[in-house]
Amino acid sequence: MANKITPFLANNITHLRAKKNQAECCLEIPTKTQAEVLSAFGHYVDDSGVLQQKHG
């Protein structure tokens, strides 16, 4: 059975800011190198930050 990658948020991070008691979540945009690696494996991150498989 082949591995299947399901879409997920790319580089979703959680961090705490100084003097705040609540964690914040945000997305990091892949660097050029990270995008090239994803592309080499047939994937890309769309405009909404979701990992997608290339078609075609």
Image (spheres, grey):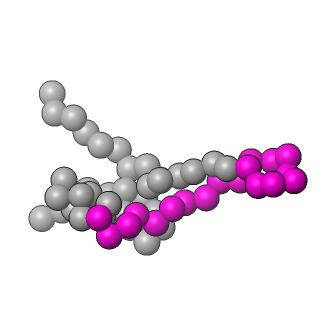
Q: Is residue 9 left or right of residue 43?
A: right
Question: Which quadrant is the N terminus positioned in?
Answer: top left
The quadrant in which residue 45 appears is: bottom left
**Residue at horizontal 16 percent and vertical 33 percent from the top:** 2
Give the x, y percent position of residue 17: 76, 55
Vertical position of residue 48 compared to residue 25: above or below: below
Q: Look at the image and tell me whether residue 44 can be seen.
A: no
Vertical position of residue 9 compared to residue 55: above or below: above
Question: Which quadrant is the C terminus positioned in?
Answer: bottom left
Q: How many marks?
A: 0
Range of magenta residues = 16-33
- 26 falls in the magenta region: yes
- 23 falls in the magenta region: yes
Q: Is residue 2 left or right of residue 25?
A: left
Give the x, y percent position of residue 50: 43, 59
**Residue at horizontal 53 percent and vertical 52 percent from the top:** 12
